[in-house]
Image (tube, rainbow, N blue to C red):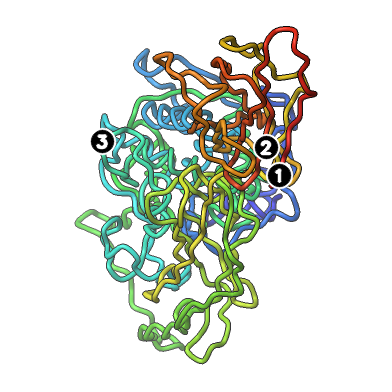
Amino acid sequence: MAAQFGRRLCKGAATTAVAAVAVAALSASQAPGVNDHGRQAAADATPSPDASASDGSATGNSPYYTDLPPLNSPSPSPSTGTGPVAPGTSEAGIPATVLDAYKKAEAALRDAKPGCNLPWQLLAAIGRVESGQARGGRVNAEGTTISPILGPQLDGNGFALIKDTDNGAYDGNSTYDQAVGPMQFIPSTWAWAGRDANGDGKKDPNNIYDAALAAGHYLCRFNWDLSDQKDLDRAILSYNNSREYLNLVMRWLEYYRKGTHEIPDGTGTLPDNRSDNGAGANPGPSTPSTPGRPAAGGSKPKPSPPAKPGGGGTTKPKPPSTPPSTPPTTPSTPPSTSPTPTDTVHHLEDAGTAKLTAMAGDTFTKRISTRAETKAGKAVAKVRIRFTIVGDTDTTFTGGESVATVATNSSGVAVAPALQAGEKTGDVTVRATVVGRMVAGLDYTATVTERAADALARTGDAALTCTPGGEFANQVEVKATYKGAVADGVAATATLIKSADDPTANDKGPFFKDADGKAVRTLTGLKTDAKGLLKLPKLYADDTTGTFLLRITTEGGATLTVELTVAAAGTSSPSPSASPST
């Protein structure tokens, strides 16, 4: 652990020994424990060894703040406005508006994706690491940052190379992308992950409410359950693909789970250290410094030169008696950046995607596969492919998202998550595009069909008999199945037909009644329930006696023919029968 975090405890002059002592103290103060929900404490749970993420990430793997949580465990304090903030508490506290945004996002995800089990403390941990809680809560009353929070431009010089994807709309940079806002989304990710949490009609990455909700949905995609350590690891790594980042976020998560407190907006402190060793990059308004500590993002003031004896100014340093042995070097021209895999992509090809068909409400059994290729047809690995469901449809990827980004493998192939059919039937278009490069997209068609049944059967065997002018004592109930499984929500039609060879509606014999009490012999718009059951309304008889047929058909071709008998009282009736056919 010292190897991972010691270099971040004290910047610059800290020795290895001092760092080791600091980390040991930290470990002692944050001993393993059990959180409120009875799960293993997040900081002490070993990250799953197989945790991984695609090359894409919410932040583009931008730099982040590496400061560790305070050594002392937090303790809740009175809410904002009850009095002055005690010295040192602003470092551990969360600004009021920022904290409110995290908690509202947790509540929204609890309704939208209850299986995700997103804790607001995870959003707080990521918000601390990414932006120091929106630069100490420097936001206006609506939750928008006083000034934009931008990461360094991702130009490949010490960072990932991500060329402009938004024409500077979010980051003001039309050459390269930069991470934006308190949760540090890169524009290409915000384009599909962004949310309007405060209902102002805009998806603003600089608004903490919008950004926190977007981060929650991002962490909850792919049906991840964040109460499971492996899924939690995967989700955090997908935000920034770094083992050090994962470990750091886990420590802040556990710190906040032990308790935190609310502080007034704008009174939080900025972290000092970043993962790229750039302290205070784009810090925004300066944070008031504390005694013995420089302002966040700044450097220690240089001591004034000693005064000349007797006063009268400062002493000028003497020039060296001999010239330096090494002549001053002139700044070298930045080396040219070699093409990235993304730069070499010429086109996209289908990678053997099978026909995509599923019934409404079902998961597609086949998945979309796309291959990135050079002009010469060579596969390109490590390229991010964005799959977007377009058009008016309620079909989504598993997890409820309409967009998914997947990196191509060593064969240049990216496989999209499985599609989940909605209730709207018809063709759905899924478009594959290359993230960070203007290459023609590749469209796939997925077809959602009506829910279907291939078999129908009565649920009982009671005789269906009636006297002339009376009503049948038993109602007809059937169960629909498809390949042996319950077929729920399947459309059905019931018709009292003339004969087995003539399926047109009869004009005499048994009948149903409509809302006005009039006789009807065809019922449409019927649907099986969640158990695949369909119970027909009561049947009545006119004065005609004899044997009659009721035929029930469903979407998918299942058919069941049931015999009805109308006979005078005391007349023997034949045994009931039903003739299923497909």
Q: Outermost residue toward the bottom?
A: 376
Most foreground residue, 172 or 510? 510
Q: Which mark is residue 560?
A: 2
| Kind of residue at disc 1 | Ser
The residue lying at 21 percent from left, 58 percent from top is 313
Ranked by sequence position, the earlier of labels 3 and 1 is 3
Q: Is 45 displayed left or right of 94 in the figure?
A: right
Q: Which residue is mark 3?
A: 200
Q: Which residue is mark 1?
A: 581
Which quarter of the picture shows residue 39? top right
Residue 284 percent location from the top left of the image: 30, 47
Residue 306 percent location from the top left of the image: 32, 56
Q: Mark 1: few, some, or many residues within 10 Å (few <14, many ≥20)?
A: some
Q: Do we see residue 31 in this rendering?
A: no
Residue 333 percent location from the top left of the image: 37, 86
Q: Secondary structure at mark 2?
A: strand
| Kind of residue at disc 2 | Leu
| Kind of residue at disc 3 | Asp
Q: CA distance from mark 2 to mark 1?
A: 6 Å
When the figure is inspected, residue 256 is found, relative to residue 193, above or below; the finding is: above
Ranked by sequence position, the earlier of labels 2 and 1 is 2
Judge depth for marks 3 and 1 and give the one in front.
1
Q: Is 220 displayed left or right of 476 in the figure?
A: left
When the figure is inspected, residue 338 is found, relative to residue 49, above or below; the finding is: below
